[in-house]
């Protein structure tokens, strides 16, 4: 939900309990029947979109022909653009960058801006305040273009920034929006010079970067669809696959846009987007269960195989089958699971199609106590998708804001209370845990067996996690100043991250 950006430390971390391979009662798993449940809002579908044949690819018997190959879990977002192109790096939200990672205390290479801070006013349910720096999720994109490395991110100064990774100087002028930017940008994975970004000003934009200044080519209003609930921000980082944009919004709707990207006669990139599908991220049963209207989609959608997965602030985890989208067939919901509480963390998907989900503990429902705050779900288990769960509900608020990191045979979560846990991916056993000054809202990052994570005292930490059965070994820490709510980006061993103190930092080996 909006306005939950805090700068102080949280109370002491809770003691967490694990339940492995649980048999959870009352789970609603897969909706395979025709039609909508009673009280459902019908999705909007534009059948006039021109069907696009699926790419044929190589004529190999085992070639993957769907939307997102499960074999690419943990790998880069395609091969056309080198970089960390979206929140958590790829369609399954499981790619964290490249090394070599510093194993000794690094140095700050530059800070942006050199003086002052990235600050702006914004209004939420708590009133109008000044917000500084970058917050949740706030992960920058880092990528190679025209022989240089770019760093692009949105901040609380109501602007998107385009910086040279080596010097920290501007490559292009800032792009202004009408309010703060909480989420993470996405860079076009197919090589088109396009940046995609949301804002609290109620728009999700497509911005060209092949001119003297960043130029808005199109924007989607949160009010372009109906009905909507709760809010009108865009926090999630959209995914672009085969010329389609997949995006959730705080309007509580899931959107699919055909982009129609191409180059004009003058060589400049153009788009002609068309909203081809949208569906409410809620259903009548969810509204009855939560007894409120806080059901916005704040996380970044994930795609594996032919299914799009996302969750919402009402705790509804769902999957939509998009296998027939290019042939003009309407997407269909095929998975439903209720966590019982606000689930803003983006879902990570492993190579088997299992979902790793982090949920908050704010409403304090019986359901959230039953199914836990850290969980593994298997959509193939229709009667009982819950494989295991770990609890964090000894006090309110508690639970998970950051997306888990998949590293070898463990999933790494961090909590509102400041605990960091390594959980066995097979059975849910907590192998290790340690504490940081909370809240820890950013998503853990692991590159070259080095875990990088910040705390709310403004310290960035690194740990050796090569041995997943042993407690992480501290490698170094560096004080950046200001609560680190944003997720760091790692590219070629350099770490880029903003803080709530107002600055954006590049950290690298000395």
Image (cartoon, rainbow, N blue to C red):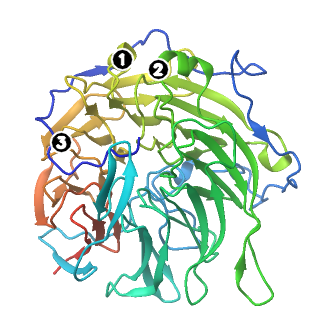
Choose top left, top right, bottom left or bottom right for residue 42.
top right
Residue 443, placed above or below residue 151: above
- Disc 1 is placed on an element classified as loop
Q: Is residue 300 left or right of residue 404?
A: right
User: What distance separates the C-alpha of mark 1 from that of mark 2?
Assistant: 8 Å
Q: Which residue in the structure is indicated by mark 1?
A: 365
Q: Mark 1, residues whose alpha carbon is within 10 Å: few (<14), some, or many (≥20)? A: some
Q: Earlier in the sequence, mark 3 or mark 1?
A: 1
Q: Earlier in the sequence, mark 2 or mark 3?
A: 2
Q: Which residue in the structure is indicated by mark 2?
A: 290
User: What distance separates the C-alpha of mark 2 from that of mark 3?
Assistant: 27 Å
* Residue at (59, 68) in percent of width and height: 188
Q: Which residue in the structure is indicated by mark 3?
A: 418
Q: Mark 2, residues whose alpha carbon is within 10 Å: few (<14), some, or many (≥20)? A: some
Residue 285, placed above or below residue 309: above
Q: Is residue 453 left or right of residue 237?
A: left
* Residue at (17, 37) in percent of width and height: 432
């Amino acid at each position: 939900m909006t306005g939950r950006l805090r700068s102080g430390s949280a109370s002491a971390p809770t003691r967490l309990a694990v339940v492995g391979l649980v048999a959870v009662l009352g789970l609603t798993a897969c909706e395979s029947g025709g039609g909508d449940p009673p009280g459902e809002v019908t999705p909007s579908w534009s059948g006039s979109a021109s069907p696009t044949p699926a790419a044929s690819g190589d004529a190999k018997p085992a070639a993957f022909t769907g939307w997102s190959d499960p074999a690419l879990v943990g790998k880069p977002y395609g091969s056309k653009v080198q970089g960390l192109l979206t929140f958590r790096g790829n369609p399954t939200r499981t790619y964290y960058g490249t090394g070599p990672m510093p194993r000794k205390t690094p140095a700050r290479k530059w800070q942006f801006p050199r003086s002052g801070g990235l600050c702006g006013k914004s209004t939420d349910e708590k009133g109008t305040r000044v917000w500084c720096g970058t917050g949740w999720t706030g992960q920058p994109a880092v990528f190679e273009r025209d022989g240089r490395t770019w760093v692009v991110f949105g901040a609380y100064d109501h602007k998107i920034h385009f910086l040279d990774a080596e010097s920290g100087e501007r490559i292009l002028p800032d792009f202004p929006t009408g309010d703060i930017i909480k989420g993470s940008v996405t860079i076009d994975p197919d090589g088109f010079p396009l940046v995609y970004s949301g804002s609290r000003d109620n728009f999700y934009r497509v911005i060209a970067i092949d001119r003297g200044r960043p130029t808005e080519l199109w924007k989607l209003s949160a009010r372009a669809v109906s009905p909507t609930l709760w809010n009108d921000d865009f926090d999630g980082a959209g995914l672009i696959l085969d010329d389609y944009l997949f995006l959730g919004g705080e309007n509580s709707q899931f959107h699919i846009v055909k982009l129609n990207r191409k180059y004009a006669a003058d060589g400049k990139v153009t788009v002609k987007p068309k909203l081809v599908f949208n569906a409410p991220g809620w259903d009548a049963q969810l509204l009855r269960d939560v007894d409120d209207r806080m059901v916005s989609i704040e996380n970044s959608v994930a795609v594996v195989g032919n299914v799009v997965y996302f969750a919402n602030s009402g705790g509804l985890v769902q999957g939509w089958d998009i296998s027939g989208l290019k042939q003009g067939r309407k997407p269909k919901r095929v998975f439903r699971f209720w966590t019982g509480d606000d689930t803003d963390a983006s879902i990570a998907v492993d190579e088997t199609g299992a979902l790793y989900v982090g949920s908050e503990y704010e409403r304090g429902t019986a359901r959230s106590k039953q199914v836990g705050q850290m969980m593994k779900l298997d959509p193939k288990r229709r009667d009982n998708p819950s494989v295991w769960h770990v609890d964090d509900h000894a006090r309110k608020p508690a639970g998970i804001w950051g997306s888990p990191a998949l590293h070898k045979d463990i999933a790494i979560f961090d909590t509102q209370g400041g605990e960091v846990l390594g959980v066995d991916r097979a059975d849910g056993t907590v192998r290790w845990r340690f504490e940081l000054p909370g809240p820890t809202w950013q998503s853990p990052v692991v590159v070259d067996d080095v875990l990088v994570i910040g705390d709310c005292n403004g310290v960035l930490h690194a740990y050796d996690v090569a041995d997943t059965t042993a407690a992480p070994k501290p490698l170094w820490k560096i004080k950046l100043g200001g609560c680190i709510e944003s997720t760091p980006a790692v590219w070629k061993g350099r770490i880029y991250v903003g803080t709530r103190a107002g600055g954006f930092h590049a950290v690298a080996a000395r």
